[in-house]
Each structure stands twice: as structure tokens, then as C-alpha cells.
Amino acid sequence: MKKIILGLFLIVFLLFTWVGVAHANIDFNLAFGGQILNTEAVQVTTYEAAGYDCLVPGSTVEIYSVFGPTSYFIPSYVAPVTGYALSSGQQILGVYSGQETIVCTRDEEKSTTSQVTIILPIIYYFGTSEI
């Protein structure tokens, strides 16, 4: 039953993507799919655990695909087309383009500040499975 639902989800996703491409000239090479490992990018959690404050104007996600784990940025105004919120273990399909720079800062001793940047691809269209 899950395979049938996932197959229908894939067909609907490809249909919406095709319609979007016909009107917006979207490049198919920027499509992705896989399983959500974490609902926050590993780079962000690593720096935050080390005492950095990361300004993320949206959310991040870590996805495992055939190419291995990859982190993405999702702007706050982008919602899943399937209506299911992001959760670890879900399947996800989407389209990404561009990059978001996330700045993480940490106050060091004697008024010096340490700063690092994280650059992630931006997801602007996606859908997730129910579970």
C-alpha cells in the first residue's frame, strides 16, 4: 500500500514539476529526492553545539539520497505542497536553486567575535510523504 501511495505521490509531484517547468523554465538537474535524516542541517547543529549563534531565516534539513547526505535551506515562506510538516524518516522530493548564506557568530574572550558562514542550496518547492 505504501508503494502505491509513494508512486502516486511521485506522479503528482512530476506532474506539478512539469507544469512549473513549462511556465517557469525550471532546470530538471536541480531536482532532488531522498529520506529526511534530520530536520536541521548537521553544519548548523555542529556550530550551535560549539557555542555559535546561527541566524537561520527559515529552516534547514538534512536529506539522504543516492549521493549521500546533503543539507538544504528552506525559506520560511516555502511550505510542503503535500501539507505534511517535515519529520525525520519521511521521503521528500523537491526542486532547489540558488544558495543561502547562514552566518554563525560566537563571542570570544576580550570582546573578539568569531564568525563562520554556512552556504546551503535553497529549496523552493517540495513535498513530503505522510510518514
Image: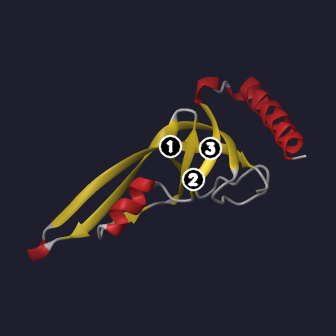
State yes or no: discs 2 and 3 in contact (Cβ < 8 Å): no
Q: Report whether 127 appears left or right of 100.
A: right
Q: Residue at x 52, y 33 (%)?
A: 67
Q: Report whether 59 appears left or right of 2.
A: left
Look at the numbered disc 1 and give the secondary structure of its residue.
strand
10 Å neighbourhood of mark 3: few (<14), some, or many (≥20)? some
Nearest the viewer among 55 and 45 is 45
Q: Of callouts 1 and 2, which one flags the residue occurring earlier in the amino acid sequence?
A: 2
> Residue 28, relative to residue 109: is it above or below?
above
Q: Report whether 112 appears left or right of 101.
A: left
Residue under label 1, please give it: 69
Q: Which mark is residue 130?
A: none
Look at the numbered disc 3 and give the secondary structure of its residue.
strand
Q: Amino acid at mark 2?
A: Leu
Q: Of callouts 3 and 1, which one flags the residue occurring earlier in the amino acid sequence?
A: 1
10 Å neighbourhood of mark 1: few (<14), some, or many (≥20)? some
Mark 3 vs mark 1, CA separation in Å: 19 Å
- Residue occupying the far left of the picture: 110
Mark 2 vs mark 3, CA separation in Å: 19 Å
The quadrant holding residue 27 is: top right
Q: Which mark is residue 124?
A: 3
Q: Which mark is residue 37?
A: 2
Q: Residue at x 61, y 51 (%)?
A: 36
Residue 58 position within the rendered picture, expressed as x and y whole percent measured from the top left: 54, 59
Look at the numbered disc 2 and give the secondary structure of its residue.
strand
Q: Amino acid at mark 1?
A: Pro
